[in-house]
Amino acid sequence: MIWDLHCHFGALPGDTPDARMEKLVRFADRMGIERMCIFMGYPFLSEPTPAQLREQNDQVLDALKHWSHRAFGFVYLSPQHLEASLAEFDRCVRNGPMVGVKLWVAKRASARELDPIVEAAASMNAVIFQHTWHKTTGNLPGESEPADVAALAARHPSVPIICGHTGGEWETGIRAIRHLPLVSADLAGSDPYNGFVEMAVRELGAARVIYGSDASGRSFASQLGKVMGADINEADRKLILGENLKRMMTPILTRKGMRV
């Protein structure tokens, strides 16, 4: 069972979200990927307005109309527009089909403005996914590092949170979150270096490591290669490829009556 935590359809060709999603599913089928989490539409917007947030979430909702048997939707929110984001959460998650929250680069995860979003997500058992990156050239304004996720998680110690990309520079990222038992590492997006998965399993435990690809920005094959080629046991590999994500999503799927 392979569930991919981290997918986008915006970079694929097609005139509609449904057409782009069809291509993403075709590629996933080649790699044996059963389910995907999709978020953010197109074009990518680091500082979207409330209207643009709604438009991007509408694109994901449109894709889910035909692909809900293969994909789960996460609502794209921005703490720069807190009132609008909470309204979008209610529209797309509380009263809609989405099951998670995607936070990107509008404001660092350590900012207090994220607290109401985390609280709303926790009230529905929605999965919280926060992009992080540690760039030697300097991050984008508002772009989180793993230490920002650690600060957010420390304020919400009972809420599971996923550290997107594990900061890209994964050794720093793993060390930043290892003392927080409900923070998981997302494997997506970085080059498939040897040792990433092994260090994550060693430092965090396999139950806190989740496979994601960042497709279509990255290939499914290169990102699966990190897990398939890692020097870990098969039980841990199964946890990483799908069982951990399924376990994390089970409370909200059960709450919404969504069978998998």
Image (tube, grey):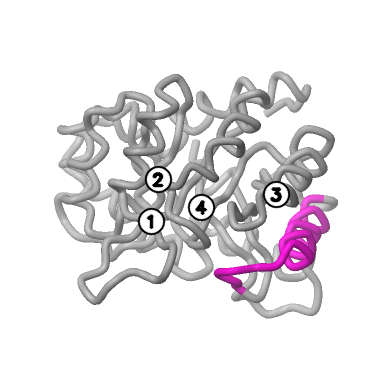
Residue underneath mark 1? 144
Look at label 3 and name its amino acid.
Answer: Ser
Residue 5 seen: yes
Q: Callout 1: helix, strand or loop?
A: loop
248 versus 66 height, above or below: above
Residue underneath mark 3? 85
Image coordinates of residue 63 in percent, x first then y, are: 78, 57
Instruction: Using a 10 Å C-alpha cutoff, classify the residue at mark 1 as few (fewer than 14 neighbours), some (14 to 19) or many (20 or more).
Output: many
Instruction: Using a 10 Å C-alpha cutoff, classify the residue at mark 2 as few (fewer than 14 neighbours), some (14 to 19) or many (20 or more).
Output: many
Q: Examine the residues drawn in magenta and state their main secondary structure.
A: helix
Q: Are marks 3 and 1 in contact (CB under 8 Å)?
A: no
Residue 6 is tagged as: 4
Instruction: Return the disc, 4 or 1, that comes first in the chain's sequence.
Output: 4
Look at label 1 and name its amino acid.
Answer: Ser
Image coordinates of residue 128 in percent, x first then y, are: 53, 39
Give the residue displayed 28% in from the left and 46% down from the top: 147
Q: CA distance from mark 2 to mark 1?
A: 8 Å
Residue underneath mark 2? 110
Q: Callout 2: helix, strand or loop?
A: loop
Q: Callout 4: helix, strand or loop?
A: strand
Q: Are marks 2 and 1 in contact (CB under 8 Å)?
A: yes
Give the residue displayed 44% in from the left and 26% down from the top: 156
* Quarter residue 252 falls in: top right
Instruction: Using a 10 Å C-alpha cutoff, classify the residue at mark 3 as few (fewer than 14 neighbours), some (14 to 19) or many (20 or more).
Output: many
Magenta-highlighted residues: 44-64
Q: Are marks 3 and 4 in contact (CB under 8 Å)?
A: no
Q: Is residue 15 in the magenta section?
A: no
Instruction: Return the disc, 4 or 2, that comes first in the chain's sequence.
Output: 4
Residue 22 seen: no
Q: Nearer the viewer, mark 3 or mark 4?
A: 3
